[in-house]
Image (cartoon, rainbow, N blue to C red):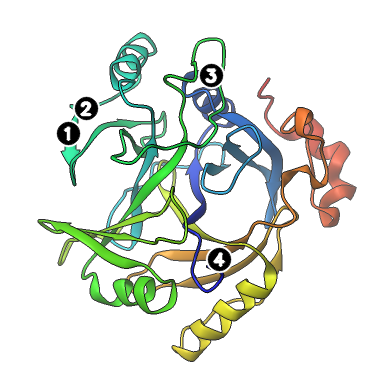
Amino acid sequence: MKNKIQGLHHITAIAGNAKQNHDFYTKILGQRLVKKTVNFDDPGTYHFYYGNEHGTPGTLLTFFPWEGIGKGTPGNGMATEITYSVPAGSLEFWEQRFKENNVSFGEKGERFGETYLPFTDPDGLNLSFIIPKSADNREAFTTPEITIDTAVKGFHSTTLSLDKIEPTAKILTEIFGYTLLAQEGNRYRFVTDAVENANYIDLLEIPGGKRGYNAGGTNHHVAFRVPDEETQMAFRELILEKNFGITPKIDRDYFYSLYFREPGGVLFEIATDNPGFTVDEPLNELGTHLKLPKQHEYLREQLEQTLPKID
């Protein structure tokens, strides 16, 4: 289904402390550090990618850990929750693990017939684990403490908080190929049938709600997945036809990107599968080396001295 968005590619958020962020996602949640690189626009700051063993699109949560940044505020015009799929029967394991590791979490709840467990990372980023109705057969990354029966599969959905959903819904349905699946109160769930997982977007309508402030513990942008550059540029033309501003294609080393801000204020990205994360590291060494964009390679000696130590 090359004429449709293939669900979520990655989501990028902001953190305040690199080591704290790294330890939480790798040691507590059991995610693989797929890539350790730097922010293209601010090379003195890391860019971490966490996901499954291969860094498969749809499993990737990435961070800009700006040391000492203040705390942000989730709100309208922002992605305000990230939901991961986990195996049936695993929520009790995660509740106990969160207790043992002093992770802040809430009561289990239900949305659209699926049980979820909300929690936050050390910067206050809103996350949740959910037991999906349909079996999630993606291969999870495991650790000695987190087995296949409990390991995180990848994204289930993300929630966008908006003053009104209609303009954003039109982007999802008229350009991206999503359809409205269901509504519960002011939450509207959209789905694409182009993929089986990471294929839901929830729109939360909060008229007159407080605007979000982007800093630590908030989401920076949401990236949608396409298989290749040809498909990506076809979507660019569709977006231009709707009179939205959109960037030229940008080479991010591991994928190609387009960015535009949808009418509700959320920064959207369209990212390709190619060339992938093994373009500059073998699979068994992903995330073990500091990889720099070629334009910043001349800074390597300096950055290796000044970037925070995370090991």
Q: Secondary structure at mark 2?
A: loop
Question: Which callout, 4 or 1, points at the residue further toward the start of the chain?
Answer: 1
Q: Residue 54 appears at what percent x and percent y? A: 66, 37
Q: Is residue 82 visible?
A: yes
Residue at which label 2 appears: 106
Residue at which label 1 appears: 109
Q: Indicate the amino acid at tag 2.
A: Gly
Is disc 3 surrounded by few (<14), some (14 to 19) or many (20+) residues within 10 Å?
Answer: some
Q: Is residue 249 visible?
A: no
Q: Residue 37 appears at what percent x and percent y? A: 72, 42
Q: Indicate the amino acid at tag 3.
A: Lys
Q: Viewer-proximal residue, 164 or 283? A: 283
* Proximity of marks 3 and 4: CB atoms separated by less than 8 Å: no
Q: Residue at x 71, y 32 (%)?
A: 287
Residue at which label 3 appears: 27
* Proximity of marks 1 and 2: CB atoms separated by less than 8 Å: yes
Mark 1 vs mark 2: give the one in front.
1
Q: Indicate the amino acid at tag 4.
A: Ile
Question: Which callout, 2 or 4, points at the residue further toward the start of the chain?
Answer: 2
